[in-house]
Image (spheres, grey):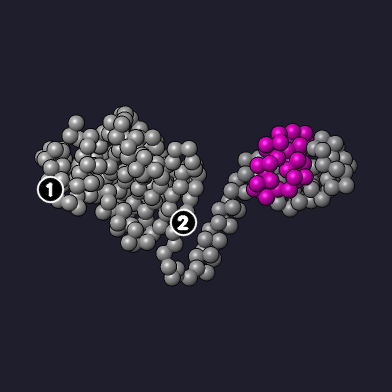
Amino acid sequence: MDQIVSELQRVGFSQYEAQAYVALLQHSPVTGYELSKRSGVPRSMIYEALGKLLDRGAAYIVPAEPTTYAPVAAKEVIMRLRRNAEETFTSLESSLTALESPAEVETIHHIRGYDPVLAEMTTLIEHAQKELWLSFWTAEVSVFDAQKAGGIGILCVYLGEGDDDGLQAGIKVFREQIPPREAHEIEQRQQGRLHIAVRDAEEVIIANFLKGSRPWAIKTQDKALVFLATELIQRSILLGVLSNEVGAEHIKEICRQHPALKNLADREWSSRSR
């Protein structure tokens, strides 16, 4: 019962209103005095609570001597609350949007915590209209639901060991299976499991799930960061496809002959040549 009272308070009822309405649903019609005893609302406050319930259309007076009260049906009250809330949100959206001024700088939002980071990534996916570019690890694969993206094409680098049962139908995947030892090395180098999600060439989230620490993420519509993140994922796919087509050892040897790429070769193709 306490939970119901708390939930009614969340949609605008006072504690006494909520207690009185719940008691009315269980016992009616009743006098104000009886309702006070059944609901736990003090006698000095019960008529004020009843007056507010009458005003919001959650209760009505039953003509009798003495005066008694009865509740409006729960479904009707909930329907009215839902309609009023929707009207309020629609009005606020229009009013607040009209007040907004164009941002002079692109904002970078910082998010911390496992659930908040996953929630932001899910929201980005749900709002995709044209395309998604993703790079993620198996440990967090469940958050990437193709159906939440409306069935649009998704291109991604899929990193990690194990199977990909968590992926939904319709996702176009470049899969890079990483042996446990190298997965550990990459996590060490990235100081966690780095994830990137780019939506419609408009917005990017870069997140890192850290071992022994709170995950963090940044979210932005900064065009430069969106472009760089997309390029990074595309180049990762390109390197993987080339490695599969011409052989990892061949690419690694080419890189070794170029001083600037030597470290890249040792880092990126160590597992593919095994």
Q: Label 2 amino acid?
A: His
Image quadrant in which you'd find residue 185: top left
Front residue of 80/233: it is 233
- Name the residue nearer the viewer: 66 or 15: 15
Q: Identify the residue under disc 2.
A: 109
Q: Which residue is drawn at 35% across and 48% down?
A: 197
Q: Does the magenta stretch include residue 159?
A: no
Image coordinates of residue 243 in percent, x first then y, are: 16, 40
Query: Along the polypeptide, which appears first: circle 1 or circle 2?
Result: 2
Neighbour class for label 2 at 10 Å: few (<14), some, many (≥20)? few
Label 1: state its secondary structure: loop
Residue 71 visible at all: no
Above or below for 75 versus 96: above
* Quadrant housing residue 169: top left
Percent coordinates x, y for residue 198 in the rendering: 34, 51
Image depth: mark 1 or mark 2 in front? 1
Task: Locate the N terminus by quadrant.
Answer: top right
Percent x, y of residue 92: 55, 61
Q: State the predominant SS element of the stretch in magenta.
A: helix
Q: Callout 1: 10 Å neighbours few (<14), some, many (20+)?
A: few
Q: Bounds of the magenta span? A: 1-28
Which label number is shown at residue 171?
Answer: none
Q: How far apart are marks 1 and 2 (CA)?
A: 41 Å
Q: Name the residue under label 1.
A: 257
Query: How many discs mark residues in the rendered view?
Result: 2
Is residue 41 visible in the rendered image? The answer is yes
Three-letter amino acid code of the residue under disc 1 = Gln
> Residue 242 or 220: which is nearer the viewer?
242
As for residue 17 lying within the magenta part, the answer is yes
**Residue 90 at x, y percent in the picture:** 53, 58
Q: Residue at x 75, y 45 (%)?
A: 15
